[in-house]
Amino acid sequence: MNIQTSAPSELTITGNIKSMDDYSAIKEQAQNVISKGCVELTLKIVDSFSMPSSVIGFLLKLKQKENIRLRMQVTDQRLFTLLNDLNLVAEFGVVKITGQA
Amino acid sequence: MLTPCFTHSQADDIKEYTIGLHLLCVSSTKEDCVHFVNKYGSFFKLISMASSATEGLAIFAENCPDIMVVSHPLDNFSVFDFLKRLPEYPSRTPVIIHTDSVDLEFVTKTLTLGVLRFIPRSSTEEDTLLAIGDLARQIFAKRAYSILVNQEMELLRYRTRYHSQQQELAVRKEKHLLRNDLVGGLLMLKNGNTISRWFIGITHKPHDIMCGDAYIVRQLESGDLLLFLVDAMGSGLSASLTAVSATSCVNFLIDLYEREERFDFNRLVDCFIAHCRTILLDDEVISSGFIHFDVSSDSCNAALFGLPPFVVTSADGAVATVRGKNPPVTNITENWQRQSIFINSCNGLIIHTDGLSDAETADGVLFSERLFTDVEETFTANELFERFKKNVKNREDDMTFIRLGRIPVCEPFFRHFIQDPSCSDISIAVNNFEKSLLQFYDLGSGWIESILLALNETMINALEHGCLGMGGAKKQQLIANEEYDAALSQKAYSSHILLTAEHHIIGKRAAIILFVEDSGSGFNLKEVLSQKATKNDFQGRGRIVIASMIDQLTYNYNGNTACLLKYLP
């Protein structure tokens, strides 16, 4: 998995999110963005078809405890379905996009 | 003055129907209206006067009169135009035409526009009152009917609501009485040092709200397994009562025998039959079956009463059926026959009600005709049910089956034991597993990443819940306090996780099966599996993530061993 800051409050993630290392990288980058005063965060998830529960837990904490406005653009239908099954589409502001994010 | 032939009692009778009504009188001459009010004013709740058609339409639109008298002709407006411009067309408000001259064409046309009576101007007061009274009675009858219909509808709605509520409560009770000790879906049968591992799954699909099928799956203190399936005659409420009674009895007997440490298969069946004799009507039968996996003797005892033959898969994959030896239980049944098969020779077993085998497929044949093929080509209960759903479009009976599938004995191709695990140890284990997997398979990266993600998630669960004893509330608190990562990165002393991976060919398909066992005490599977992950809840999501990545996720009885099945692409 690769993660980079693509705009002041936007992170673009390529590859699959699958390990604890991936979780740590996402957490570090997100906290880096928020520490600069951003109150919203957009995650562009280009390839991943799933998301570990640790990442979900971290994002929920951002939303619910730190009041960060989340937006998420996902490309893979399987990830969208999973987030929908977990009732997180509205919570994370998930949008399914086609093609490259 | 009323004529002698028109008595006051007749007038009072008419008034009884008209006094609650609002009459609109439309005439081009005000005198007509005034005359009407003077003559009949005391008969109505209200009389509105309109001295033109336009005014009549405005009053009609605003006040919706109950009955209308229209003088013909009207200035600047034909009666037809007036009637056509009413908000209701044709008018549902009864209309009386007050006129001097009518011809047949006029009558025919106005009748289609809601006109019910014609009163010549020359009519006597009595004739006019009789005509009005007749219409008032019709209005009364219509309204009474409408009230009655509404009352009936309300009563019907109330009854429907009441019955639905009762049925929902009854279904809750019904489900409460069904019992499955192996809700996790992974059965470990221990005989000395030998452990046989089985997937066990139940598909239970009522046809009506209430169900005539019921089941019990119990793992006994001895480690034995007992399956009970019942199919009461018919479907719906009556069948459900019989099934529920039978299930309660069997559960009660098992609990009693377990408490007194004297479980005896024959006695259980005898007592069940004795119970059936007390609950069945003369014309009732009950199909049922008991299967007891007696681990110590490596045998499987069965007592089948009118159930379809159960399906057995042998070690070489061949599918066969074993016919029961007893007819359905009636209220005079006394004797029965037991039958046995050796567990070692059996790799799979399906016990089912006729809702499975007798269901008609879209091709017009019974599902039993394709059951062997579907059993051969599938392994889990879910997979078989998917085949059933695909082929049977209209189910006409309750359907229940319990499926057991043995995971063949196999030397693991990967084994990783972690003593005092931490998060980084798990990353190492998952990386090593990936390397090992790549030695055997050149599979698409998507497939490998799916299984790695599922494995990683499972092992983190084992670390959190099994090794660190982190409950849902504790985890939530740690995440909120930013202490979660630190907790996972520390070693969980005096605990361990064992990961094993095996190659298999099951259901004619190549698959990998992973076992993740932790040293924890497990968790209450029934409680956890019935929970749904919510956006506000920090637990339960891991299981959903894992299940979405693989083909089958099961847990053992205690919940400290997870088994992940994933077919090769």
Image: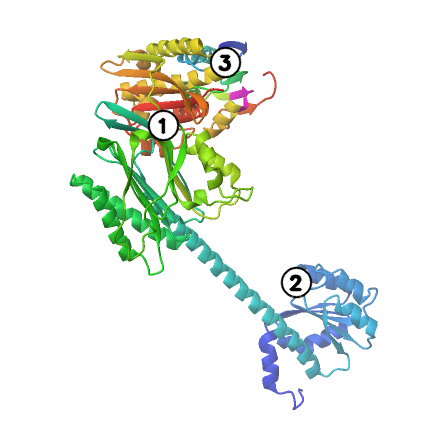
Q: Amino acid at mark 1?
A: Ala
Number of the front mark, 2 or 3? 3
Say few, some or many: other residues with alpha carbon within 10 Å of mark 3 (under 14 / 14 to 19 / 20 or more).
Answer: few
On screen, residue B106 above or below B249: below
Name which residue type carries label 2: Cys
Across and down, in percent, residue B334 comes to 25, 54
Which labelled disc corresponds to residue B64? Answer: 2
Q: Which residue is mark 1?
A: B315
Question: Which chain letter matches label 3?
Answer: B
Residue B532 position within the rendered picture, expressed as x and y whole percent measured from the top left: 40, 32
Residue B415 x %, y %:
33, 13
Q: For mark 3, what is the residue?
A: B445
What color scheme is it? Answer: rainbow
Q: Is residue A91 visible?
A: no
In this rendering, the count of numbered labels is 3
Residue A76 is inside the magenta segment: yes
Question: Numbered disc 2: what chain?
Answer: B
Q: Chain of mark 1?
A: B
Q: Secondary structure at mark 3?
A: helix
Residue at image coords 31%, 15%:
B487
**Taking B126 as reference, is B549 above or below it?**
above
Q: Secondary structure at mark 2?
A: loop
First along the sequence among labels 1 and 3:
1
- The foreground one among B233 and B209 is B233
